[in-house]
Image: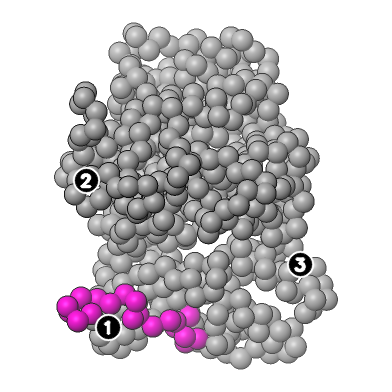
Amino acid sequence: HELIEAQVRRSPEATAVVHEGGSLSYAELNRRANRLAHALIEQGVTPDERVAICLTRGAQMMVAVLAVLKAGGAYVPIDPAYPAERIAYMLEDAAPRVLITLGSLWGQRSPQLPMIDLEAGHCALQSDTDLDPRVLGLSSQHLAYVIYTSGSTGRPKGVMVEHSSLVNLLCAMKQISGLTPRDRWLAVTTLTFDIAALEIFLPLLCGATVVMADAGMSGDPARLGQALDRLEITAMQATPATWRLLVDSGWQGRAGLLALCGGEALNAELGARLSQRVGTLWNVYGPTEATVWCTAQRIEPGTRLGSTCPIGAPIANTRMYVLDAMGQPVPIGVAGELHIGGVQVARGYLNRAQLTAERFVSDPFVAQPARLYKSGDLARWRDDGTLEFLGRNDDQVKVRGFRIELGEIEATLRRQCGVDDAVVVAREDTPGHTKLVAYYLAEQPLLAQQLRAELASQLPDYMLPGAWVHLSAWPLTPHGKLDRRALPAPEGADHELQVYEEPQGPIETTLARLWAELLGLQRVGRHDHFFALGGHSLLAVQLLARMRPALGREVALAELFAHP
């Protein structure tokens, strides 16, 4: 935040944040953040103290994040759309000193901790002067944020990231991106996804403008494509799923656009198409435990690629090792587990000493004491010195950019009444479309609608299975272990969350046929829910494209989201 304060002094009247027609200058953003920071200090916030932020996207969220850092605290983002049980667990585990939110947003929930309601005007009389980190006792080794990711034990785990790690990322990406004060960065990522830190802070370090997209824009390619032109955007970061939404919707691209693509593997076909529609395309890779991105690869138009785009070479002050099961480096071209070293390695997991010891290990390849993060990702070195991502070596998957521990869904499902055991897998029965499928053991088949409702009260939407398969016994390997490869593909009845009722009339019949084709189902009833059956934004765009010739009418994507 001192780097941002230096930029405030250089260009106080420049536009820092734009959201829904309003804007904040660098000076005004800084003043508002200072007032809130002084209020946080009055609440007892000191270095390494956590501060929960539960806000929707917008200028207030930017103010809150910056204020927490200025006060010396570490921000803990909480999505207001999360189920109440998940929010309660995160607050209990993080034990924040204070919660920043809006009274109208928080509603009737009553946290057992102090709350700053930004609608109440409590900060109006606070000082708007910068705080001195030295007076606060704040150093680069203190926490900047704690981000919760999916956990294999059935509970999310908080990753602790320090200022030094975040500053290294930002300085490295500033050099890679070439961002200048003339740039306008469209921020589309939710704050609970760690890559949002880059969207929020990098433009502010460069004197550029952060343009905050509203929550629905990233899922609507028509609006997103229009916004890139209308708002004169020069830079955007998104997952391959979001970029594919744009490309598949017919977006012709934007000349000069700086495009960062990360969060999951970038398919070579998409990389080739996208590189031809933007000015510069970077494929970036990094787990939350290594502070957002730790490798980068520029994808040039016309470059010959394999099945996936390379993830590149380490960014500044980062070390990447591909090791075998004995912890030894493997030769070029040989697959191994990716281990990450350097200044961006996180402090560890909050309140998880044993898990931290398992995943953050001593680095034997440097003289001074240092640690490596065992990523669980498989990779190999290419002849040109870049890395190629090969997938996971455990049960963690990425679906549409979200990192998901299948064990967390399984643990939640096993707690449901009548479920004896459960396994969740990510299947790609339709090429390019990954879907979560839940398999469960029970005496009798259970209502999929009821199971989904139970999980929806505890897990976010992106972790809800799209199909539910009842089995009386697990398929086993000759060694008596679960044979995941022998789990059957879901059939039509496995997707039915409602009692089946036949479609009525030509329009419903046509829609049911299109749904069944896209979702790989035998039948679709007139009360079914597109997203509950495994549909998502990418499939929604394809559905609308098929509806045009089949029904002879144009339907907006927003209509499908409103009436799924």
53 vs 170, nearest the viewer: 170
Magenta range is 477-495
Q: Hey, what amino acid is under mark 2?
A: Gly
Q: Which residue is mark 3?
A: 555
Q: Residue at x 42, y 42 (%)?
A: 286
Q: CA distance from mark 2 to mark 3?
A: 54 Å
User: Residue 100, percent across and down?
Assistant: 44, 34
Please identify the residue farthest to the right as the structure is shown.
Answer: 552
Circle nearer the N terminus (2, 1): 2
Instruction: Provide the residue designation for mark 2.
Output: 327
Earlier along the polypeptide chain: callout 2 or callout 3? 2
- Which marked residue is nearer to the observer: mark 2 or mark 1? 2
Q: Is residue 380 above or below residue 167?
A: below
Which callout, 3 or 1, points at the residue further toward the start of the chain?
1
| Secondary structure of the residue carrying numbered label 2 | loop
Is 246 magenta? The answer is no
Q: CA distance from mark 2 to mark 1?
A: 33 Å
Q: Is residue 281 left or right of residue 312?
A: right
The numbered mark at residue 475 is 1
Closer to viewer: mark 3 or mark 1: 1
Q: Quarter-wise, where is residue 14 in the image?
A: top right
Q: Nearer the viewer, residue 61 or 10?
A: 10
Element marked by disc 1: loop
Q: Is residue 160 left or right of residue 127?
A: left
Q: Is residue 496 left or right of residue 459?
A: right
Q: Is residue 146 at least partly visible in the picture?
A: no
The crowding category of the residue bearing disc 1, from other C-alpha atoms within 10 Å (few below 14, some 14 to 19, many at least 20), is some
Whether residue 278 appears in this view of the structure is yes
Q: 287 or 457: nearer the eye? A: 287
Depicted 455 relative to depicted 304: above or below: below
Pointer 3 local density, CA inside 10 Å: few below 14, some 14–19, many at least 20: few
